[in-house]
Structures are given as structure tokens and as C-alpha cells.
Image: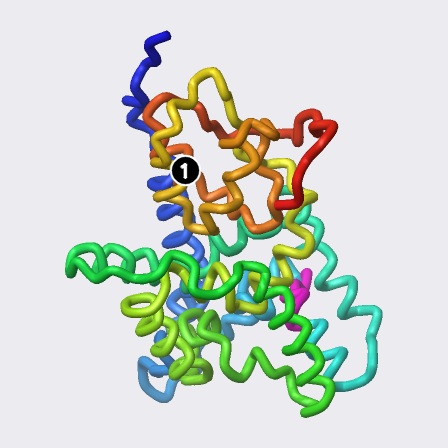
Amino acid sequence: MKRTPNTSHFKWSWLRHAVQIAAVLLFAAPLLLAGWGLFGVSVGGDDPVPTPADLTFFGSLSSSSVGGLSLLDPFGVLQVVAASKTFELDWLLFALPVVVFYGLVRARAFCGWVCPTNLLLELVDALRRKLGIKVSEAPVPRHAKLWIALAVLALSAVASVPVFEAFSPIGAVNKGILFGSVAGLWTLGAVVVAELFWGHRVWCRSLCPLGGFYEAIGRAGLVNVKYDRTACIHCDACRKACLADPSILDPVLAERDAVVRAGDCMACGSCVDACPTRALSMGLGKGAKPTEQEPS
């Protein structure tokens, strides 16, 4: 049967990039509205200026205040608990809304839709393609980031310091723009070099401990990529476009499942955009599980 080509003008990547840019602007807005500068630069003279923390929204991806409600990065909280060997109920209460939100949507949606490092690496992807540089698709197993996340927590306990916060490339982008922080700058540089010359999305797919944390809770999400096997022509366009890891599409492409269930999936929509026959779509719900399913 002849299938209709996917000529729809709507592209998930356009919406996703708009959300990523909006997230950067959202965090920058309080500093600008208060008359402060970005990148740690002060503006104005000696006259007093408003405090951004007094505004409705203020903060970074590690810690924010929204309408007086504090929100904390849950993986950061785990590091602090491990480093301090203490636990405060407030930490759980402030991290829980973040866990619930991403848990209901799809945990690694943070990676695909919010993380500024992912946005930067998409630009690096485009640069590498323009330069014609070939890199390995999977130099490191994608589940390595789960073990790296556990190692970060163990090292935080040993060093009594939240280890990932000291070298996080996410902080190098987010906190660097907002506060001029250089923490994680060398890591960010190494990630960019690795992306250019070593492996396609090796940081996001295999090495990022925050991605490992979100992968661990990623299967619970309600936003999923769905598969119509009658429309698929097995052109592999979806695998080539996947930002997370092409192997997460194997169960549906082998017709063992109708939904991409892997915790790795970022729900970024890149595979949906790439599909020429609309065999893939974004939708709500997990669908019926197959009677026999190989682990993804």
C-alpha cells in the first residue's frame, strides 16, 4: 500500500528549540528585570537596585523559587544528602514537584526540552555535519550513565562535596550565563570536543549522571513515541535522527512493541519529524504491553 509522505509543516524540533530558548530566557529575565547584568556583570551605578530573589520567579536549574515555592534539582538533593550524611524533609518537599512533573511527562524530557547543554550540542552536531567529520555512533554503552550517577553519589559521600555540581557542564551554561560561574567550564569544553571528534552525543547518551538519574525513572512517563507498523517502510530515518540512542527504537522497529518504552527516550520528537510515512507519532499513554518483550 502506498503511504502518504510526511509533508506536515509542524515539526517537534521547532517547538522543542523554542522551549529550550525560552527556558534560557526565563532564567535570565529576573536578572534583567531587576537591572542586573548577565555573566556576572553588574550594570548601573551606586544606586540601589531590586533584588531578583524578590521577584515571582528566580533561580537556576539547580535551585529556583516560583511564587515563593522553592524547587530543587532532585539529583542535586541526592548529592547533598550523600555529602552531608544528613536529611532534611524540606529537601524532599522541594525536589518532589520536579520528580513528579518529569515523572508524569517523561523523565528525560528534561534532557530533550530544557537542558541547555543539549541545545548547545545540537549546534555542535550541525557543525560536525557541515565539516564532514565522522564519529562513532555508540563508543560507550548508553546505560553507563546509570552507573556514573551511582558513582557520583558514592564520591559525594566520600568527598563530602556534591561532586557533579563542581564539574557539571549544565551548570557551566546555565549558571555561567546567569552568574558568570566558571564551574564546569572545562567539562563543557571537553564535552564539545568529544562531540566533535569522538562520539555522537556521547555525553548525553552515555556519560551524563543527571541523564542517568532521569533514565532510572524514565519509563513512568505518559508522553511517548507511538509506532504504526503498517506505515513503517524501515528506512531507518528515525534511527539516524534519534538524539537519545538509536537502539531504543529497536523493539518497535522489530514489531515487538507499539510504544518506545525505554527510559532513555527524551520525547524530543526528532524521530517523529524524520519519519517520511508518519509511522511514528507523539501521544499520551503507554499502550498495551506485549506478552513477550526483550529488555530495552
281 and 119: which is toward the camera:
281
Q: Which residue is located at x 37 percent, y 78 percent?
A: 190
Near mark 1 (Cα within 10 A), the count class, few <14, some 14-19 or many ≥20, is many
291 and 203: which is toward the camera:
291
Instruction: Check the image and report above or below for 120 versus 152.
Output: above
Instruction: Check the image and report above or below for 1 versus 151.
Output: above
Q: Quadrant of the C terminus?
A: top right
Q: Which amino acid is tagged 1?
A: Cys
Q: Position of residue 176 (x, y in %)?
A: 40, 77
Tell whether position 286 is magenta.
no
Q: Position of residue 66 (x, y in %)?
A: 61, 59
* Region rendered in magenta: 69-76
Mark 1 sits on what residue? 271
Q: What is the quadrant of residue 257 in the picture?
A: top right
Extreme residue in the bottom direction: 159
Whether residue 56 is visible, yes or no, is no
Q: Position of residue 136 (x, y in %)?
A: 35, 61
Extreme residue in the top direction: 1
